[in-house]
Image (cartoon, rainbow, N blue to C red):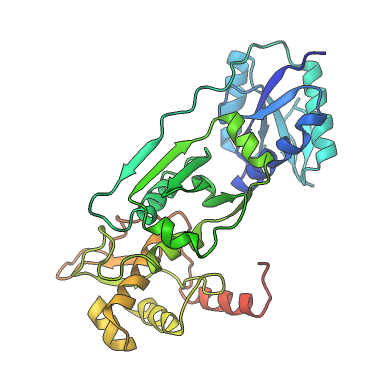
Amino acid sequence: MRQCRRTLTVVGLPVQKELLVRSLLTVVNTRTRDRWYFSDSIDSDVALCDPSSALTLLAQKHAQRTGFPQCVSVVREGVMPLPETPVLSAPIYASNFIALLDALSSTLSARTTSVDAATSAPLRITFSEDKFRVGVALHDLVGRASRDVQRIDANGVIFHVIPAARALLLRQPLDEDALPHLFRARDVSITPLTEGQTQDLFGDGAKPQSIDWLLWRAGLDGPHDRLLPTLPADATFALRRWPDFGRLKHQPFHLRMAALLTRAAHSIDQLSAAVAQSGDECRAFVNACALSDLVEVHQKDSAQEPSSKYFHQTVAPSTNRYAGIFRSIRHVLGFTQS
């Protein structure tokens, strides 16, 4: 029997659950009645919805107008599903997921779906002067918060990123030998993957991990003789919150720098004198913190509030600047999940 091609999206679910759904599709696709593919479009056959999200109301209105998507309530214990919708209980198990998809295949009307669009032309970023290249490109990409998987090719080092999740997708770890080659790249090619390519990537065993460590290393291992192009050389700098030293490469003097910058803003020269380290080491630390969205920029001789316009804030700052210190200690002692 010929399999139909069906598409599925998520509406209102957190990024972590979206990643789980994407992964599950690659696992169950050979065991379902039809072939299912993930899509970012609201015109998909099926939408897995959070009943409490305002976005779900928009999906329902779209379905009333066009007939698609078929909304499915994803609920945990104690949460009421949407009226007259199929229900998928969380946590989502493969067997329940397969049963749901096969049941939907029986009820969905025939629909012509297009094959994957041709791969979009890659966005090629060339840096003729700037030596930070990869770090700046990745930082800007994460700031756009797209949910589409992006392929990064920098000096032949290839990996994938989900900007909205601040996640790397890696088939195998980036080793230390590859990092200097990566950070020296002059050209950075960024290409969005098609639906099918994304399915293949997950099917090949790509695993998500946080991109934060790579942004940190891009600043720390980048040029030490200058600040990032968007950081004024004559400014002073403070930290919004403590870096997660339990997970990030660091030296003992980085903790002293962080302690000073969480208390008050310092210029590079002031920081260098306070911790008895070179200006190069201080610039590298500030660059790493800036690419990690931890830095507040204070312009000299200005009555304006501290500026963060140069760096997007994708993680809400802690209400306690010293909370990160205790989080790092808990991680080192093994009290947090790695």
> Taking 144 as reference, is 61 above or below it?
above
> Taking 224 as reference, is 275 above or below it?
below
User: Residue 2's quadrant in the figure?
Assistant: top right
Q: Residue at x 36, y 77 (%)?
A: 261
Q: Is residue 13 left or right of residue 303?
A: right
User: Residue 17's quadrant in the figure?
Assistant: top right
- Would you say residue 326 is visible in this rendering? yes
Instruction: Name the image quarter holding the C terminus.
Output: bottom right
Q: Is residue 295 left or right of residue 76?
A: left
- Would you say residue 39 is visible in this rendering? no
Q: Residue at x 65, y 41 (%)?
A: 202
Nearest the eye: 50 or 215: 215
User: Residue 44's quadrant in the figure?
Assistant: top right
Q: Residue at x 18, y 67 (%)?
A: 303
Q: Is residue 317 left or right of residue 78?
A: left
The spot of residue 112 in percent (x, y) is 64, 11
The spot of residue 139 in percent (x, y) is 40, 53
